[in-house]
Image (cartoon, rainbow, N blue to C red):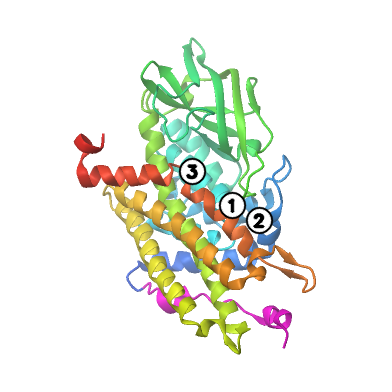
Amino acid sequence: MTIDEIASQITLSRRADNIFNEALLPDETRRIRREARDFAETVLKPEAFRLNTTPESRDSFPRAMFKAMAAAGLYEIPFPTDVGGRGLEFPTLATMIVLEELGYFSAGIASALFDAQALLVGQTLANASDTLRLRYLPKIVRGEVVGSFATSEPQASTDLSPGALRTMATRTENGWRINGKKRWISNAIAADFILTLCRTGSNEQTIILVETDQNGVEVGAPDLKMGNHPQLTSDVTYNEALAPEENVVGKVGGGLKAALSALMLGRIGIGAVGVGLAQAAFDQASAHMEQRHAFGQPLARFQHWQFTFADHAIQLEAARGIYLKAAQLHDIGFPADAEAAMAKVAGSRLAVDVARDAIQVCGAYGFARYVQGAESERTLEAIYRDAKIGEIYEGANEIQKWILARRIFGRHITG
């Protein structure tokens, strides 16, 4: 049997099912994993190769997948019943489980359509006034609107301090007048509104909801990126854009705190997506090593690869456990900042490491996107491209380590 015939017959098994024991998770969380996995396998998987390899364009927002996720009820999972949500006991835990399952097939879809919508936009609006909360969250749950979360700027990303931020909002008798530019804004090209972090004083920052159909808001063409192609990011320019007073999210001056709170949840989410990516690469490499022979024996019989992937199994268990713990701590009302930092570093770093080793053991079959002679789509190269951004965005991993160092040594030493 040729390698092409072998590859066509490989059925991936979820190796985590043989290693990771979910017995300690709540029953509702296990049910959500089954639900999310069924959606990912039946709806996302058939479209994943196309989505993950199609370059960004103004027309490539994955609207059909967005609608399918809403129709499947995935946007109900993070939210309470008064806005159309499920009212789960552990909503954050369930949300992160969904991100892992979506990330297994497409980090870009998980990040753009669930992390950005349900965590960054959704959780920020969950803490807004009842006027905004009840106006927009039910529409998010039903998939009727797309929202964006705009903090980063050309000169301000990890550093969101008042001195770094340039987007200004000035109070007028009709509300707020906004001027400035945001960069790397997910979903802006399709957004109905943008939660915009602005300076509203010399040392004051505020989040203001800005509708994109009004004059003064211009969304640029999507950036062309190394990976995460379904996650469209664009510049957003505000030129005398107006927003009514009631569109202030939370309190005037409370913007940075609200943004950091959402980003903390986003970091747990990045950890979960990283685990999904790492697990996918692990499963593909394991299947290949069992079937591919070299020097008369399966690759899986070489001790180097046995030990390498045993180490990765340990790291997968650890990274998964950290993001689950961080999410559950948040659900029961405990601070989870340190665990969120750990989850982001562990999950994103592991995705890069496992993808690299998976490509190495699969050789050219890992490096290729499509093998013409075998008429075979290959997905490891997309996992490798998609994994890297997890170490960078929503607070670079170096910043997460600094957060942890502050816990270890105290701010009087670390600054």
SS category of the residue bearing label 2 = helix
Q: Residues within 10 Å of mark 3 (few under 14, many from 20)?
A: some
The range drawn in magenta is 1-22
Which amino acid type is shown beneath numbered disc 2?
Asn
Discs 2, 3 touching: Cβ within 8 Å: no
Pinpoint residue 182: horizontal percent, then vertical percent: 55, 29
Tag 1 residue = 108
Is 63 in front, or is 350? 350
The verdict on residue 337 being magenta is: no
Q: Nearer the viewer, residue 337 or 44?
A: 337
CB contact under 8 Å: marks 2 and 1: yes
Residue 354 shown left or right of residue 400 in the figure: right
Taking the spot 44% from the left edge, 49% from the top edge, the residue there is 79
Residue annotated with mark 3: 393
Inspect this view and state whether residue 88 appears: no
Q: Report which quarter residue 102 is drawn in.
A: bottom right
Q: Earlier in the sequence, mark 2 or mark 1?
A: 2
Q: Amino acid at mark 1?
A: Gly
The Cα–Cα distance between marks 1 and 3, rounded to whole angstroms, is 13 Å
Q: Amino acid at mark 3?
A: Tyr
Q: Is residue 3 left or right of residue 178?
A: right
Going by the image, does 79 lie left or right of 243?
left
5 inside magenta stretch:
yes
Mark 1 falls on what kind of element?
Answer: helix
Tell which circle, 1 or 3, labels the residue nearer the N-terminal end.
Answer: 1
24 left or right of 152? left
Marks 2 and 3 sit apart, C-alpha to C-alpha, by: 19 Å
Residue displayed at 58% across by 64% down: 39
Q: Is residue 357 visible?
A: yes
Q: CA distance from mark 2 to mark 1?
A: 7 Å
Query: Disc number at residue 52?
Result: 2
